[in-house]
Image: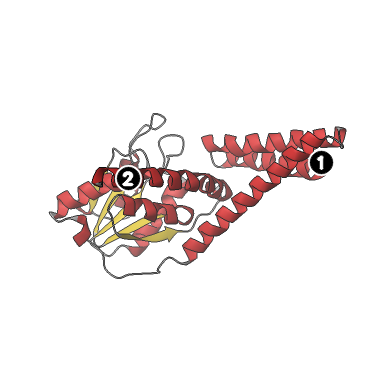
Amino acid sequence: MGIVWCIIGTLVLLYCGGVWFMAGKMRFVRVPAAGGLMGLILGVLLLLFPGNGLLHGISFLGICGILVLLLLEGSILFQVRRLPVDTGPVDYTVVLGCGLRDGERASRTMVERLQKALEVWQGEKIVLSGGQSGREKYPEAEVMAQWLMNKGVPREKLILEDHSRNTLENLRFSRQRMEKDSGLPVKKLAVRLVTNDFHAPRALSIARQAGVDAYAVPAKTGGIAAPLYHLRECLAAPLWWGRKWKMRKGERRKSA
């Protein structure tokens, strides 16, 4: 088993190095890199001390962790396959933002979302949702708006929501923008949500929690960083489930 862990750890470290070099300095890459380093160290220790029970116990837990991640990934892929292909005309399309490359340029993931939004656009207003983190020079919504205007979308068709910091705020603040623009409650509006495929199932769950009854159009994720995004989603999904449970529990207490 020591050889297996050495191979796994080395491959993960090489992959993380490739992502860092080719896709930019993504902070999350440190998580799998740390896991790869731990796997490599575990493999070396197992080779040096093959009869150590503690090391074999850690190895067993590591294998269980990998299996859990694979199950979560399978669940995400299954949910993506079940998404409806099209539900007809909409009143608004909401494009969820994501981090800027080098703090100022549209990342590949963001471009994938914008290309999908442009592909399905039928003349409705597009809500671009994404604020500005401490590592970014501009709000994500502004960068997305400039990209779409460069492709011919009129400025008057764009609504910028540039204060959100996470997906829940994306949907809550976008709901406010749509209701203010239309003068109608969001329940009377047909809303299309554009994000990447790995993010679509959780984004829809968050949308429902924010009171937005939307359907998702997933953008295909490509590039060397795609497995990294899927890994991050596998870790984020259980955290959202826990947060949603707490929110619902709080709502039940208020209504009691």
> Residue 184 or 157: which is nearer the viewer?
184
Q: Secondary structure at mark 1?
A: helix
Q: Residue at label 1?
A: 2
Locate residue 47 relative to residue 196 in the image: left or right.
Answer: right
Residue lying at the far front of the rendered structure: 256
The residue located at (61%, 53%) in the rendering is: 70
Q: Position of residue 113 (x, y in %)?
A: 40, 53
> Residue 21 or 75: which is nearer the viewer?
75
Specify which label sits upstream in the sequence, 2 or 1: 1
The crowding category of the residue bearing disc 2, from other C-alpha atoms within 10 Å (few below 14, some 14 to 19, many at least 20), is many
Q: Residue at label 2?
A: 170
Does residue 225 lie above or below 122 as drawn? above
> Tag 2: residue type?
Asn
Locate residue 34 relative to residue 89 in the image: left or right.
Answer: right
Q: Marks 2/1: CA distance?
A: 45 Å
Locate residue 16 relative to residue 60 in the image: left or right.
Answer: left
Q: Position of residue 1 (x, y in %)?
A: 81, 44
Q: Position of residue 11 (x, y in %)?
A: 71, 44
Residue lying at the far left of the rendered structure: 183
Locate residue 256 relative to residue 201 in the image: left or right.
Answer: left
The residue located at (81%, 36%) in the rendering is: 53
> Tag 1: residue type?
Gly
Labels 2 & 1 near each other (Cβ < 8 A): no
**From the viewer's perspective, is the residue at label 2 or at label 1 nearer?**
1
Q: Position of residue 150 (x, y in %)?
A: 32, 50
Q: Is residue 26 visible?
A: no
